[in-house]
Image (cartoon, grey):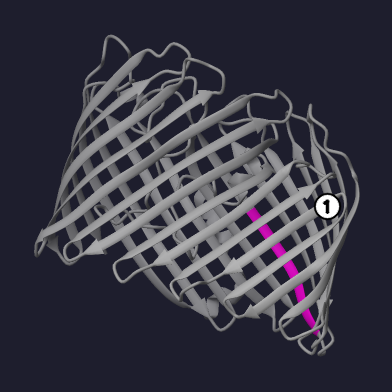
């Protein structure tokens, strides 16, 4: 009933006029493991039967877009029947225009399972009985008004309310409310461009301190030449979060220039009171895009130098993406944004599919665990995908550090994955993959790590049915004790689409 209620809540009345595309599926598998609980000693062998029905649903109408992907993961343990269980995995969303060119409504929901504590044994999925994973349920609604005021101005008023619910103890369920709005120049502007915006965010936690954030920003730009503009920024920050480091409230302003000699290059730099910043956007060739920003502000949550950037490059056979971000955030906000939900999504926000199963792809998640604290998050990530003939090679590496505001703990995770898919016959393919990550509290000599290696062979039995056999090996070390554990698996899978 929970899953059905969440999906239904994401579907407004306007979706009745949408064109629907639905696919039902069934995934059956039998898994043998030689270390069910990832124990250091006294490993326990087990045979697990997995029966996973699911569906994918998309709808598109004149003023509505809807999507949902759901899997019911049913696990049956031959020697531990008391541990038989069902896990739900859901990602649902909708975007609708309820009143043409004026009133809009978005909503989203998710159900996933996430690591609770990195100090315990780290399982990469729900099969192992470690007691170290928790259901995470999110739901968010976002009505907003967007209106052009003739050629001279455009405005938007937006309100969002989200809920994050955790099954695990020790981390607080949270409600998040955000009200924001802006008014800016309209499409008729030729020389003077401006924008005034305000945002209020409040998070109410059941078992931890609440937090509030408030920001007002203004921008004005005057075009002096076709390639040169004068630009200025001003704003105010007021925040109330639990923190042991300074985050002063106050105002700031900066002024400078924007140079835009061609559609492929834009450079902006400003300096003033309590703020200086720079921004570069550059496409040296059609298939390459660079976006780098720098800011040094003396008020607000992050008063140090801050960098953010992305680089993307495409060739005929490959795609490359590099990104770096710095932000002050928390687990609950990341969950509402889908960044901690477990599903892998593509650049358009759509759920990615596992090439072997056709089911939603579940990532090898970052092992930070769950926390009620705000933290400064810095993350660098590189991904590459290369296709040649019958082969596809994928590579991804990342390095993320979180500095927690209240405890001042500084934690780091480094990880990556590499895979090679080879379709060596018309209906037969193989896949080799390695995934790993290393977790540590900085200045500690006892990090933990997990590495999984797998080899699979898949056969397309019919247009809607495929089978797969997989062998895998997992090596792990516990944080603090560095006690070693490992696991070997053999699994048989059958996937059917209807």
- What residue do we see at 16% from left, 48% from top? 468
Mark 1 neighbour density, 10 Å: few (under 14) some (14–19) many (20 or more) = many
Q: Is residue 372 above or below residue 223?
A: above
Name the residue at the left extreme.
425
> Magenta includes 41?
no
Judging depth in this view, the residue of 487 and 379 nearest the camera is: 379
Magenta stretch in the rendered image: 140-148
Q: Position of residue 71 (x, y in %)?
A: 39, 50
Q: Position of residue 7 (x, y in %)?
A: 53, 58
> Magenta includes 146?
yes
Q: Is residue 345 above or below residue 454?
A: below
Q: Main secondary structure of the magenta part?
A: strand
Residue 373 quadrant: top right
Judging depth in this view, the residue of 122 and 165 nearest the camera is: 122
Q: Is residue 1 above or below residue 94?
A: above
Which residue bears the numbered disc 1?
A: 275
Judging depth in this view, the residue of 286 and 35 nearest the camera is: 286
**Horizontal side, residue 276 vs residue 498: left or right:** right
Res. 200 visible in picture: yes
Q: Position of residue 228 (x, y in %)?
A: 75, 79
- What residue do we see at 29% from left, 60% from top? 386
**Horizontal side, residue 227 vs residue 66: left or right:** right
Q: Position of residue 205 (x, y in %)?
A: 74, 36
């Amino acid at each position: 009933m929970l899953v059905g209620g969440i999906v239904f809540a994401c579907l407004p009345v306007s979706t009745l006029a949408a064109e629907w595309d639905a696919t039902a599926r069934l995934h059956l598998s039998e898994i043998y493991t030689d270390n069910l609980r990832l124990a250091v000693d006294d490993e326990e062998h087990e045979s697990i039967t997995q029966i996973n029905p699911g569906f994918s649903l998309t709808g598109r109408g004149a003023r509505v877009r809807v999507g949902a992907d759901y899997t019911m993961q049913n696990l049956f343990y031959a020697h531990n029947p008391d541990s038989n269980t069902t896990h739900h995995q859901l990602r649902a969303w909708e975007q609708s225009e309820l009143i043409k060119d004026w009133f809009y409504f978005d909503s989203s929901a998710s159900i996933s399972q996430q690591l609770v504590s990195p100090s315990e044994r780290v399982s990469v999925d729900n099969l192992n009985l470690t007691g170290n994973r928790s259901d995470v349920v999110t739901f968010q609604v976002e009505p907003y008004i967007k209106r052009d005021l003739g050629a001279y101005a455009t405005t938007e008023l937006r309100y969002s309310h989200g809920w994050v619910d955790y099954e695990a103890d020790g981390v607080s369920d949270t409600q998040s409310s955000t009200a924001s709005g802006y008014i800016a120049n309209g499409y008729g502007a030729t020389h003077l461009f401006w924008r005034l915006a305000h945002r209020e965010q409040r998070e109410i936690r059941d078992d931890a301190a609440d937090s509030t954030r408030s920001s007002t920003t203004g921008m004005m730009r005057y075009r002096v030449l076709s390639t040169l503009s004068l630009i200025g920024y001003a704003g105010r920050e007021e925040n109330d979060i639990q923190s042991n480091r300074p985050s002063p409230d106050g105002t700031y302003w900066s002024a400078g220039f924007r140079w835009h000699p061609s559609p492929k290059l834009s450079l902006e730099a400003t300096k003033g009171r309590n703020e200086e910043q720079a921004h570069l956007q550059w496409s040296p060739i059609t298939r390459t895009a660079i976006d780098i920003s720098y800011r040094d502000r003396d008020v607000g949550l992050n008063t140090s130098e801050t960098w953010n950037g992305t680089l993307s490059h495409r060739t005929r056979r490959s795609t490359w993406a590099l990104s770096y971000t710095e932000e002050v955030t928390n687990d609950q906000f990341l969950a509402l944004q889908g960044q901690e939900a477990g599903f892998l999504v593509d650049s358009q926000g759509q759920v990615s599919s596992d090439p072997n199963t056709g089911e939603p792809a579940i990532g090898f998640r970052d092992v930070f665990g769950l926390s009620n604290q705000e933290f400064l998050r810095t993350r660098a990530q590189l991904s590459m995908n290369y296709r040649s003939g019958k082969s596809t090679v994928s590579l991804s590496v990342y390095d993320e550090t979180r500095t927690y505001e209240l405890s001042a703990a500084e934690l780091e995770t480094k990880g990556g994955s590499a895979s090679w898919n080879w379709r060596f016959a018309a209906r037969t393919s193989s896949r080799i993959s390695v995934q790993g990550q290393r977790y540590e509290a900085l200045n500690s000599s006892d990090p933990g790590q997990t590495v999984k290696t797998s080899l699979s062979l898949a056969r397309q039995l019919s247009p809607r049915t495929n089978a797969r056999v997989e062998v895998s090996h997992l090596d792990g070390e516990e944080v603090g004790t560095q006690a070693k554990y490992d696991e070997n698996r053999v699994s048989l899978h059958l996937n059917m689409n209807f």
